[in-house]
Structures are given as C-alpha cells and as structure tokens.
Image: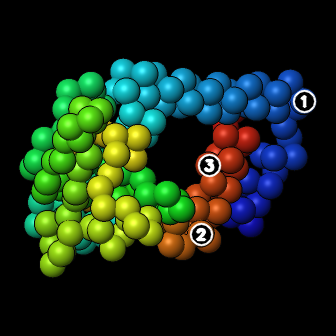
C-alpha cells in the first residue's frame, strides 16, 4: 500500500497519551514563535519587526520577496531613510524612501513625504484623502537590514492559499505520526 497506507496505520496506532504529548509539543512550538515575535517587537520598538517587500516599487534596492528588518527609535527621521508605513484605511504596509522632511514650527513634530525608488512621483496619491505628509504614528519602522528572496515563501502562500493548506496539513501529519 506504500507510504499512504503506512501513514494511516501509524495514525490508527496512536495512543491517547502520545497524542496529548504531540499536541503539547505543537503548542510549545507555536507559543515559542509568539514569544520570539513579541520579544522582537520589544527590542526593535516596531509593531512589525519583519516585513516582506510585496511590490517592485523599491527596485533596484529591494526586490519583491525580500525580507526587511525594522527598528523604530526616537531619533528623528531623515530624508533618504527607508521606512515602512501604514496608511489609514489600508491593511498592507508600504516600504518607501523618505524624500522630504517637514518640521512644524508650532509643535516641533516632523512630517515626512515618501516615494518608491522605482516610482515616478511621490506617494501623496497613496495617502488618505487630503493628507500631504505622513506623521510619526503612520511609520512602523526604519529598514535596518534585509534578506533577499526569503519572503517569496510568504508571497506564494498568500497568493496561492492551497499551498499553505497543503503545507500546514503535511506538517500537522508529520507531528501526529512522529514516534518521539
């Protein structure tokens, strides 16, 4: 019967205690990942310390599928820095370069204007209606490092959900059928 038959026999022979042990192990893996994520959030000061570049707007510097590591500090944002920001009413963060910094004389707060390196114009058309600059609360972090192409896994699983479900199912089956 082959691999499928062996897998079915393996699942049938699982004892309750073994099943609970496997469930606890899986829970510990998931919990560990969440703790690491929350720890990174505390260390970097960013609500999302790692993001994937989803478009070609920052080419040639960053390509689609690159993973960016973010850090958010109290230092003022400068022109030329690459930031990741959220727009009111949009779910997906955007990675672009700061091209202009505007300091308000009355409050001393700094507003920024961004642009994708591969885009023709600035990002004012992306901002909320009537918004000319981004405020600090829109910025999730500054790019401090990257890994090329590693984010393609995330892009493929988002664009083709069946692959995500097959992968999750295979990993779950592997956890359930492992003997240790």
Which of the 4 quarters of the picture holds residue 169? Answer: bottom right
Number of residues whose C-alpha sits closer than 10 Å to that of mark 2, classed few (under 14), some (14–19) or many (20 or more): few
Question: Helix or strand or loop: what does disc 1 sit on?
Answer: helix
Q: CA distance from mark 1 to mark 2?
A: 32 Å
- Which image quadrant: the N terminus? bottom right
Q: Quadrant of the C terminus?
A: top right
Secondary structure beneath dot 2 equals helix
The residue labelled by disc 1 is 16
In the rendered view, does 31 fall on the left or right side of 57? right
Q: Secondary structure at mark 3?
A: helix
Residue 48 as seen in the image, left or right of residue 89? left
Q: Residue at 34% of width from left, 45% of height from top?
A: 135
Q: Which residue corresponds to mark 3?
A: 171
Residue placed most toward the observer, 41 or 4: 41
Residue located 50% across and 26% down the image: 38
Residue under circle 2?
Answer: 161
Snapshot colouring: rainbow
Observer able to see residue 127: yes
Label 1 crowd (10 A; few <14 / some 14-19 / many >=20): few
Residue 123 location, x and y as percent? 27, 67
Tell me the residue at 62%/63% (across/down): 166
In the image, what residue occupies the spot 67% across and 40% down?
A: 175
Tags 3 and 2 touching, CB below 8 Å: no
Q: Label 3 to label 1, Cα distance in Å?
A: 20 Å
Look at the picture and state if 68 lies above or below 117.
Answer: above
Q: Residues within 10 Å of mark 3 (few under 14, many from 20)?
A: few
Identify the disc placed on residue 119.
none
């Amino acid at each position: 019967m082959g691999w499928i038959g062996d897998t079915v026999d393996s699942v049938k022979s699982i004892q309750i205690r073994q099943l609970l042990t496997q469930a606890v192990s899986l829970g510990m893996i998931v919990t560990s990942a969440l703790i690491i994520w929350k720890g990174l959030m505390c260390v970097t000061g960013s609500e999302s310390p790692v993001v994937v570049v989803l478009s070609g707007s920052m080419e040639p510097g960053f390509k689609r599928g690159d993973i960016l590591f973010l850090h958010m500090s109290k230092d003022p944002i400068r022109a030329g820095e690459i930031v990741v920001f959220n727009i009111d009413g949009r779910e997906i963060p955007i990675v672009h370069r700061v091209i202009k910094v505007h300091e308000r004389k009355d409050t001393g707060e700094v507003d920024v204007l961004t642009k994708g390196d591969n885009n023709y114009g600035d990002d004012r058309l992306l901002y909320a209606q009537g918004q000319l600059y981004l405020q600090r609360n829109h910025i999730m972090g500054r790019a401090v490092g990257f890994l090329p192409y590693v984010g393609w896994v995330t892009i493929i699983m988002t664009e083709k959900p069946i692959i995500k479900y097959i992968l999750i199912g295979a990993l779950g089956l592997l956890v359930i059928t492992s003997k240790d």
